[in-house]
Image (cartoon, rainbow, N blue to C red):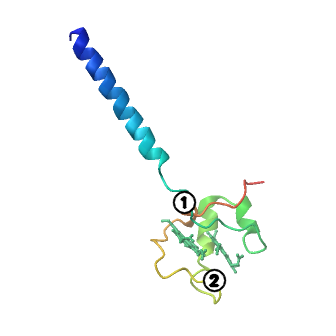
Amino acid sequence: MNKKKATVYNVLFLAAAAGILIFLSMAPPETTARIPYDENHKIFFRMHKKEAEKKCSGCHGKKAGMPLPKNHPPKYRCLFCHKMSKPRP
Ligand code: HEC
Ligand code: HEC
């Protein structure tokens, strides 16, 4: 490959990399509700995620006062989307 060609490829590569970074930095802020640190949820903060997820549906989507929104996305693996509201103690 001659020098000129190499330069063109380098510039293209840098432009593509910059484009990807700009695209990623434009992602909207995360808005998914975090799990509150309260009486209902405190125990989950110390649990393994997969263990904790089995218990969510005992309340959410079942008992009154804590329904899932009608347009809730597929709810397999709650903790994939809903993060703990503060770092695990
Ligand atoms: C003992 C019943 C109970 C269990 C079990 C439970 N929750 Fe909740 N959850 C509630 C109640 C009641 C509320 C609403 C009041 C509040 O904010 O604490 C709530 C609120 C939430 C919210 C916040 C909603 C908002 O409006 O901000 C999220 C997110 C959530 N729960 C996720 C989970 C996940 C994930 C699990 C499983 C790890 C779980 N919950 C287990 C009762 C429960
Ligand atoms: C694919 C990602 C995803 C998964 C998995 C998921 N959720 Fe959600 N959840 C959302 C989004 C998005 C919303 C609506 C935006 C928001 O959080 O306010 C929502 C909303 C909620 C709300 C109401 C929050 C509010 O402010 O009213 C509760 C409660 C909730 N989810 C509980 C659960 C539980 C319990 C599970 C597991 C059984 C679960 N979610 C799994 C993405 C997810």
Say left or right for 25 vs 48: left
Q: Position of residue 69 (x, y in %)?
A: 53, 80
Q: Do the residues bearing badges 1 and 2 touch, measured as CB atoms within 8 Å?
A: no
Q: Is residue 70 above or below residue 29?
A: below
Q: Answer with the quarter of the image where residue 35 lies.
A: bottom right
Q: Residue placed at 62% from the left, 74% from the top?
A: 56
- Which badge, 1 or 2, is on the more N-terminal residue? 2
Nearest to the observer: residue 42 or residue 85? 85
Say left or right for 14 vs 78: left
Marking on residue 80? 1
Q: Position of residue 87 (x, y in %)?
A: 72, 53
User: Does any atom of ligand 2 lie closer than 8 Å to the CB of label 1?
Assistant: yes
Q: Is residue 36 above or below residue 9?
A: below
Nearest to the observer: residue 60 or residue 5? 5
Marking on residue 52? none
Q: Position of residue 18 (x, y in %)?
A: 41, 34
Q: Residue placed at 30% from the left, 27% from the top?
A: 12
Q: What SS does tag 2 mark?
A: loop
Q: Quadrant of the C terminus?
A: bottom right
Hey, what amino acid is under mark 1? Phe
User: Does any atom of ligand 1 lie closer than 8 Å to the CB of label 2?
Assistant: yes
- According to the picture, the residue beneath numbered tag 2 turns out to be 66
Q: What SS does tag 1 mark?
A: helix
Say left or right for 54 vs 11: right
